[in-house]
Image (cartoon, rainbow, N blue to C red):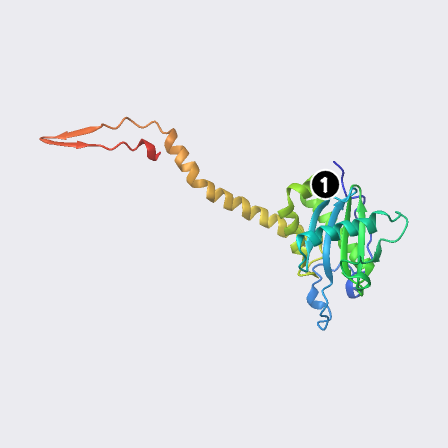
Amino acid sequence: MHRYLTGSGSTWGTAFCGAPWSDAGYRCRNWDQSRTVRMIKAILVFNNHGKPRFMRFYQHFAEEMQQQIVRETFHLVSKRDDNVCNFLEGGSLIGGSDYKLIYRHYATLYFVFCVDSSESELGILDLIQVFVETLDKCFENVCELDLIFNVDKVHYILHEMVMGGMVLETNMNEVVAQVEAQNKLEKSETGFSAAPARAVSAVKSMNLPELPRNINIGDINIKVPNLSHLV
């Protein structure tokens, strides 16, 4: 079990449009509305052996094509030395020179964002860092297995940060607060759904007297049905 996060509390650079990441709640509506190209085309997470652990595409690809994109991306990224920069031209299957692959390598995992070629490399690197630190906060020392067995929660966390390829939130505390609120809601809904089952269990455990099978009132004989199967 390896922890991805190799450092926290670092001073990050400026984000999109020159806005610092410390500005809580930076929203995509502050961008130039004339832009029609999606900022992020895909987000891929795979391990050191190229096994995909998480994939999110913001453009439709057939499943077979998605697997090919992961293999090509892994081939491009994994052969790079740790001392070189963390961005390169996109693979041929995902847009070529029109897109860039920006990645970070944490222990056993690669986090790769495929973005529009005009985007800020440093901004996306910081966004990856925020994503990983948020995962680390939500899963408490996140590891590779957390992504495998909690894929729905990972999608929810990412959805709080990126929607439709556009960044919604870059403040980790805001994202964590939303995740915790969702967890509380799910727990309360689980409690409501379990209430009927608890009620039936309580009835079964009650020590009720044996009901008479027949009731005689004068010349009238009433047969009492067996209701034990209902509880």
215 w.r.t. 100: above or below: above
Q: Position of residue 136 (x, y in %)?
A: 72, 44
Q: Indicate the quadrant where residue 215 lies.
A: top left
Which quarter shows the C terminus?
top left
Which quarter shows the N terminus?
top right
Q: Indicate the quadrant where residue 168 lies.
A: bottom right
Most extreme residue toward the bottom is 34
Most extreme residue toward the right is 83
Q: Indicate the quadrant where residue 14 lies.
A: bottom right
Q: Position of residue 174 (x, y in %)?
A: 67, 54
30 w.r.t. 76: above or below: below
For the question of whether residue 200 can be seen, the reply is yes
For the question of whether residue 10 can be seen, the reply is no
Q: Position of residue 102 (x, y in %)?
A: 80, 55
179 w.r.t. 100: above or below: above
Residue that label 1 marks: 144
- Say which residue appears at 68% left-offset and 44% top-offset: 147
The reply, left or right, for residue 23 in relation to residue 213 is right
Q: Determine the secondary structure under disc 1.
A: helix
Most extreme residue toward the front is 64
- Say which residue appears at 78% left-offset and 66% top-offset: 17
- Which of the pair 138/128 is nearer the observer? 128
Local crowd size for mark 1, using a 10 Å CA cut-off: few (<14), some (14–19), many (≥20): some
